Image: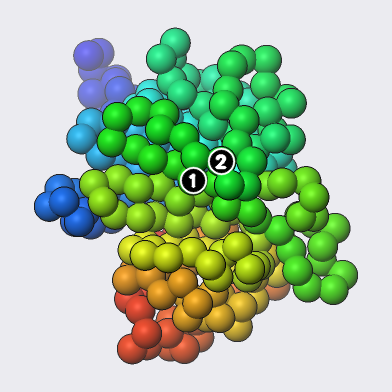
Amino acid sequence: MSFLAALFGCNKQPQHPSDTISTRDGGSLTFHFYAHASLAVEVDGKWIYIDPVMVHANYSRLKKADVILVTHHHSDHFDAVAVDELSTRTTEILCDRTAAEAFEMNCHTMRPGSVATPIEGLKVEAVAAYNTSEGHTKFHPREREDCGYVLTIGGTRIYVAGDTEPTKEMKALKNIDVAFLPVNQPYTMTVEQAVEAVKAIQPTLFYPYHYGQVEETTDLEALKAQLEGITEVRIFPME
């Protein structure tokens, strides 16, 4: 390493907030929080990225992906450059139908109800993601088949909802251990809708995500207060 690289840490990976939890089988996994809807799950040396976007992280300096999940084609969720930066010849890419049309590379097209096992130890189930409120359905129409995903790792079920409001498909989910639900308006959930969703799916742990970057500020403290005694809420910076 050169003197300047050592001095300024040029060869170090960027630091982002993270949180480690135990899995049902006695193992552990770590969530990495970048910004907005961009996340990663690290488990047993494998890296699973969800909706990577270059403005949220310098993906060229992060660990390469074993799996990449894309929920839908909006630019704050789908960035072909970020996907390319993270990919190797063995990376498995799973994406919704509309984003799949933009890929020149191979990817697995997921539709609501699809199930995939892209790598050993990971099961991915696609869940419909769409708006339900009057005047908002144009943002994420049901017929476009945007996706959220349930990841099963070590027996632990992790729901990453994508852009959605509470839907019948979401409320039908069972045995969710961890939930990432979007809370920004007017595009996804209000605080009240997020509370409704948490009460319906009853996760043990809830991470609000996909907030900020819009005019209307999400009252995260009010959200946490309304869920006191219902589930554990952990808030990490995602703006």
Q: Is residue 232 visible?
A: yes
Q: Where in the figure is residue 177, as x and y percent of width and height?
A: 33, 63
- In which quadrant will I find the C terminus? bottom right
Give the Cα distance between marks 1 and 2.
6 Å
Q: In the image, what residue occupies the spot 56% across and 81% down?
A: 196
Q: Quadrant of residue 47?
A: top left
Q: Are marks 1 and 2 in contact (CB under 8 Å)?
A: yes
Amino acid, disc 2:
Ser
Q: Where in the figure is residue 144, as x and y percent of width and height?
A: 78, 46
Q: Is residue 94 above or below residue 140?
A: above
Q: Secondary structure at mark 1?
A: strand
| Residue 147 - label | none
**What residue would you read off at disc 2?**
114
Q: Is residue 137 left or right of residue 179?
A: right
Q: Quadrant of residue 228?
A: bottom left
Q: Is residue 57 visible?
A: no
Q: In the image, what residue occupies the spot 40% across and 33% down?
A: 117
Q: Earlier in the sequence, mark 1 or mark 2?
A: 2
Amino acid, disc 1:
Glu
**What residue would you read off at disc 1?**
125
Q: Secondary structure at mark 2?
A: loop
Q: Nearer the viewer, residue 216 or 89?
A: 89
